[in-house]
Amino acid sequence: MFISGLLFLTIIGIFPAIGLFFTSLGLIYVAQGKEQVACPHCKKKQPVLKSSENFTCPKCQKLTVINWA
């Protein structure tokens, strides 16, 4: 992201900087370590960070505690 910011300052590097910026955002999103978890109440699957201890289901709005062990 830093290199994309530097490239964006130059006229020639604006277009590669935009592509590099979005590629960097995608890699950061993938590296967060998410896992698909199914809600025990309505069975809707959603991505949850592996460091999370709980999540609220967007469909049924119920809080669920996660036991990763």
Image (cartoon, rainbow, N blue to C red):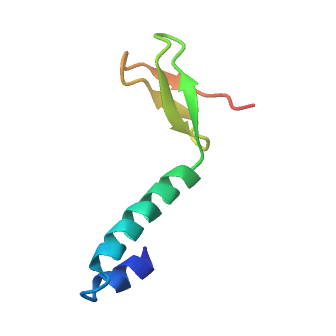
Rendering coords of residue 36 (x, y %): 56, 30
Drawn side of residue 50 relative to residue 23, left or right: right
Q: Count the marks: how many?
A: 0
Q: Is residue 43 above or below residue 24?
A: above
Residue 52 horizontal/vertical position (percent): 56, 40
Residue 66: quarter of image: top right
Considering only vertical position in the picture, is 33 above or below 27?
A: above
Q: Residue at x 46, y 55 (%)?
A: 26
> Left or right: where does residue 1 sit relative to residue 51?
left
Q: Residue at x 50, y 58 (%)?
A: 28
Q: Is residue 52 left or right of residue 61?
A: right
- Residue 10's spot in the image, x, y percent? 28, 89
Answer above or below: position of 67 versus 52.
above
Quadrant of the frame with the C terminus? top right
Q: Kindly give the residue lying farthest to the bottom in the view shown.
A: 10
For residue 60, above or below residue 26: above
Q: Position of residue 33 (x, y in %)?
A: 60, 47
**Residue at the image point whose x is 56% and y is 26% from the top:** 37
